[in-house]
Amino acid sequence: MAGLPTCPLPQNDDYRALSLSGHVGFSTLPDQLVKKSIRRGFCFNILCVGETGSGKSTLINSLFNTSFDDPVSTHFLPKVELRAQTYELQERNILLKLTIVNTVGFGDQINKEDSYQPIVDYIDAQFEAYLQEELKIKRSLSNYHDSRIHVCLYFISPTGHSLKPLDLLTMRSLDSKGHMPFAVVGSDEKVQIGKKMVRVRQYPWGIVQVENENHCDFVKLREMLICTNMEDLREQTHARHYELYRRCRLEEMGFRDTGPGNEPVSLPCSMSYPERKTVCYNYASVESPQEVYEAEWSEFYLELQREEKELRQQYVQRKKEKVAMFKAEEQQQLAKHEQQMQILEEVHLKLEKKKKVLEDEIAAFLEKKANAELLQSEASVSTLAVSLNKGEDHKKNQGFRLELLCFDIRDEEITTVHQQSEREWEKLERERNSPRGFQK
């Protein structure tokens, strides 16, 4: 692009004032503008900032003499939310597209330090959306729904005390974002006074007529916002607040009005065909927006790749550390398991040995028991035979009658036959020595 001719800047000193000799017709331009504006309609956007229950919806209804049916807000939202509703109003043949943005949950949180931030972000987001539409190659600003805030109404709770720290912080943050007149008395209630139905707000000490200038400044506020300054507010939003945002954003994008030597800069000119006329590109930088965009995109893409590479390396490193840690834990668990299995095996062997010893002792005991029972049986048989023989001899010789000899053999406690025999002999001796004697 170097070496191309540049366009000369226009000089305003060459203008001359001339008089007309007759009617031309461009004096009807204001009428044409009015007709065009009426045909296209108007838009107006109001931001209502205030705590829940401070009367935002009531005042808006009073300002436009209608009911917008705003849903009831709750006091238990975790953060501030902005709710936008767009309505179409018509007065005579003038169409107005009215957008009302309500701050839901403002001032209801315990920590109110950052309650204003969502409001500032919302205003900047509307400016950014309009700027992005302007930067498009194929723009459609004539049909674009402009959502930029034209006026901000800040509602102060009528507590009778001074402003809260939240009020001061929020108003200070919104001062450069829009126009902020204060709210006044509004009401949805109508009563008949004389022959007219008027809006009033009733208090224990009396009533306040909303549209009575001796009672409050509501009429002045409505005239200022709607009747007198609505178009000025729209123009100031575009010419002042939006331009301030646009300038800062374009500077962030790399656009400049002056070069390193503080000289004015512009894009190089090109030759248009077939007229062969010099055409200049009226941009704020030597580079075209496409080149600036591509350069910023390349820089952003490289930065993104670098960050992605770092994240991948961090991921791989953390993965290796995790795998090593899991392997170490696995080895520890395996070693612990093997140690426990070895201890369990030793305990099992000891129990087996004790079991074998116990089984041997039981077998020896059973064998001894069987031998003892066998010996006792043999002794019992022989003793019984001897006893019977003695009894028969004694009966024959002395005529004694042996009534019954019995003995018990038990499993656990065994009385020997010899002992029973001795007891029987003692019994016989006692009976023989008794006075009755034995019966012959």
Image (tube, rainbow, N blue to C red):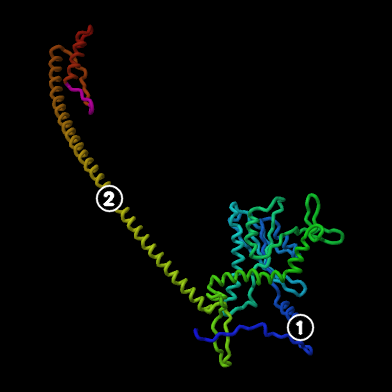
Find residue 228 and report its image quarter. bottom right
- Residue 374 position (above or below residue 398): below
Q: Which numbered marker is on residue 28?
A: 1
**88 sits to left or right of 435:** right
Query: Going from the N terminus, do you reach mark 2 or mark 1 first?
Result: 1
- Dominant SS type (magenta): loop
The numbered disc on residue 308 is none
**Would residue 38 be found to the left or right of residue 389 on screen?**
right
Magenta stretch in the rendered image: 410-417
Q: Which residue is mark 2?
A: 335
Element under disc 2: helix
Is 273 positioned to the left or the right of 16 in the image? left
Residue pictured at 55% horizontal, 81% vertical: 267
Task: Residue 276 in the image: state x and y as whole percent.
Answer: 57, 92
Give the quadrant of residue 418. Answer: top left
The image position of residue 426, as x and y in percent, is 19, 13
Looking at the image, which residue is at 21% across and 19% down? 404
Give the number of the mark in front: 2 or 1: 1
Secondary structure category for the residue under label 1: helix
Considering every residue shown, the one lying at the far right of the view is: 194
210 to the left or right of 99: right
Q: Indicate yes or no whether the magenta region holds residue 412.
A: yes
